[in-house]
Amino acid sequence: MNKTACIFGSTGLIGSHLLDLLVNDSRYERIIVFNRSLKDHTHPKIRQILSDYESISEVSNDLVANEYYCCLGTTIKKAKTREAFEYVDYLLPLQIARIAIENKVDKYLIVSSIGASEQSRNFYLRTKGKMEQEVSRLGIKRLHIFRPSMLLGKRNEKRLAESVGQVFMKFFGFLMFGVLRKYKAIHAKTVAAAMLAVANQNTDKKFFASDEIENIGQSGKI
């Protein structure tokens, strides 16, 4: 099909798996990765766009693609301030969405979080919910928002609370069934596989809960 995909956050837990899947998918001729520093990508499909996110608008003409994948995300501990956290998890996905519209991108797929809501008392979930609402208001033709539960997989950075949670979920995740299934931990590779599957099927479905992501990631079907 000779499609072009653009990934924001390709070095993260989900983004790195997504990049591997796209590289090995014959439907894609080129994968654009937006990075702040040069990475060791040797595959001929991959084209790196090097820039700070503060200057992303200056390279928007190099970000023409059929699909945008936004896998950006941080923690308040890593960001250090609420403002810095909002910049990564709210303002950047919104800015990328505007560039998608300018470049007439067919589909925009974003990683959010289970429990995201503008009305949440939790700052993290409230920020994610605000991002979802603002991006939705822009009127992108095909917008797909993924709300995974706790992510499994090896990160480049240490997150103690998440590591403890992963161990707990591995041992007791089998107890989460029925209405609780959407809270069961999910592997980052499964999320990446689900995003790729949704991008290649015609659907207007906007939100995907964690249990739906699990099913799609394993079956390849919506």
Image (spheres, rainbow, N blue to C red):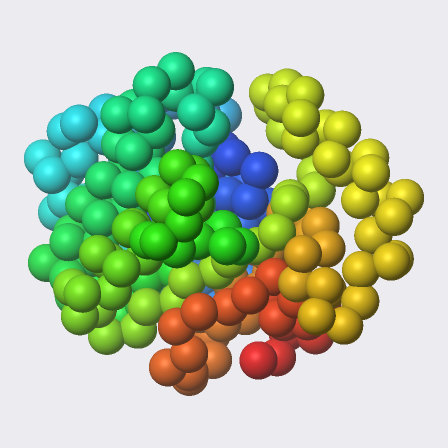
Q: Is residue 72 visible?
A: no
Instruction: Spot the residue most to the top.
Output: 80
**Image vertical order of residue 187 relative to residue 205, above or below:** above
Q: Quadrant of residue 2?
A: bottom left
Identify the residue shown where x is 87% and y is 58%: 175
Left or right of 58? Residue 171 is right
Where does the image place residue 55, in percent across and percent down from the top left?
14, 29
Identify the residue shown where x is 72% and y is 63%: 180
Left or right of 91? Residue 74 is right
Identify the residue shown where x is 76% and y is 72%: 178
Instruction: Spot the residue most to the front.
Output: 121
**Image vertical order of residue 41 relative to residue 173, above or below:** above
Where does the image place residue 181, in percent across and percent down from the top left?
73, 64
Identify the residue shown where x is 18% and y is 45%: 95
**Image vertical order of residue 48 relative to residue 138, above or below:** above
Left or right of 162? Residue 89 is left
Q: Quadrant of the C terminus?
A: bottom right
Q: Quadrant of residue 134?
A: bottom left
Q: Quadrant of the N terminus?
A: bottom left
Q: Is residue 78 visible?
A: yes
Where does the image place residue 125, in percent across and percent down from the top left?
43, 45
Q: Nearer the viewer, residue 126 or 197?
A: 126
